[in-house]
């Protein structure tokens, strides 16, 4: 969706919310839900797999993976270092990372690797764009020999695409993943309070576990695949037409 169209949608939504606040006539009021069901009930944690990647700022990394079909939860955090209980202002030798919990029946590790490679520059040493430093280095974390084999093969393929520069991505066995502070979870979504309102102003713990919030985090950053971005646009357009902003699924 073009930026102008995106801004137009936001303006229309803001107009609806203003009507809700200012209109005394209940016939014109808009209902904002207290809660929205945002996590697939049929899935259990036992059926999910987990992947962890570092590819620059975890604000953007979480948004990149959150919008993919089959991804159930995303969490910004720290991995790859030795410091116990790292914090944003004191993360030691860890890298900013994202944990991706996914349904292997809908998406697999190979596909996640493709998104990883296409979403950052693995040839930049210790940084991504303007973010420079050890915490922004590129890493694929693995949970076993099969993931290690797939990661190595994918790195070799990536290297063949450029003979003039070296792919700096590291491949490491995952030791520990430390979730980042609440302020860093679903960061892009939190910059759009209206979207938070449309899913019921979830408390922090529910927001961090929410599949819908993960997807809307990618949508807010305009990092969803084009087809998914258009699907969410259509959902929001439907809300605008009905004047009934209850977003129960995306």
Image (cartoon, rainbow, N blue to C red):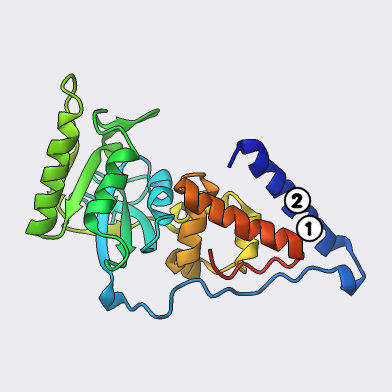
Residue at x 28%, y 70% (from the top left corner): 48
Using residue 116 as the reference point, say whether residue 194 is left or right of it.
right
Callout 1: SS: helix
Image position of 63 (left or right of 12): left
User: Label 2: few (<14), some or many (≥20) within 10 Å?
Assistant: few
Q: Which mark is residue 205?
A: none
Q: Nearer the viewer, residue 249 or 29?
A: 249
The picture quadrant where one finds residue 21 is bottom right
Q: Residues within 10 Å of mark 1 (few under 14, many from 20)?
A: some
Residue 194: image location, x then y, percent: 66, 56
Q: Position of residue 41 (x, y in %)?
A: 43, 80
Disc 1 and disc 2 in contact, CB within 8 angstroms: yes
Q: Position of residue 133 (x, y in %)?
A: 30, 32
Which residue is more in the foreground, 128 or 115?
115
Residue 234, picture quadrant: bottom right
Residue occupied by mark 2: 12
Residue 95 appears in the picture as rendered? no
Q: Residue furthest right?
A: 25
Q: Residue at x 60, y 66 (%)?
A: 199
Residue bearing the label numbered 1: 16
Q: What element does badge 2 sit on?
A: helix
Q: CA distance from mark 1 to mark 2?
A: 6 Å
Q: Residue at x 31, y 75 (%)?
A: 45
> Residue 59, relative to residue 210: is it above or below?
above
Check the image and name the residue furthest to the front.
Answer: 227
Position of the N terminus, as image quadrant, is top right
Q: Is residue 201 above or below residue 164?
A: below
Q: Residue at x 32, y 65 (%)?
A: 106
Residue 92 visible within the image: yes
């Amino acid at each position: 969706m073009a930026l102008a169209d995106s801004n137009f949608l936001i303006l229309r939504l803001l107009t609806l919310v203003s009507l809700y606040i200012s209109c005394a006539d209940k016939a014109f009021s808009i209902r904002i839900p207290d809660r929205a069901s945002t996590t697939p009930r049929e899935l259990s944690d036992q059926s999910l797999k987990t992947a962890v990647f570092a590819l620059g700022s975890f604000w953007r990394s979480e948004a990149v993976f959150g919008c993919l079909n089959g991804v159930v939860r995303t969490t910004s955090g720290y991995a790859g270092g030795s410091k116990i209980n790292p914090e944003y202002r004191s993360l030691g030798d860890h890298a900013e990372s994202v944990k991706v919990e996914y349904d292997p029946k809908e998406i697999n590790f190979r596909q996640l690797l493709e998104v990883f490679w296409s979403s950052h520059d693995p040839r930049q040493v210790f940084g991504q764009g303007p973010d420079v430093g050890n915490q922004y280095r590129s890493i694929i974390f693995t949970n076993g020999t099969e993931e290690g084999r797939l990661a190595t093969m994918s790195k070799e393929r990536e290297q063949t695409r450029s003979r003039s520069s070296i792919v700096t991505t590291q491949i490491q066995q995952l030791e520990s993943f430390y979730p980042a502070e609440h302020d860093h979870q679903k960061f892009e979504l939190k910059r759009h309070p209206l979207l938070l309102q449309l899913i019921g102003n979830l408390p922090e713990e529910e927001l961090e576990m929410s599949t819908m919030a993960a997807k809307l985090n990618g949508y807010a950053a305009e990092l969803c695949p084009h087809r998914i971005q258009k699907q969410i646009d259509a959902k929001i357009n439907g809300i605008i037409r009905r004047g009934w902003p209850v977003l129960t699924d995306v």
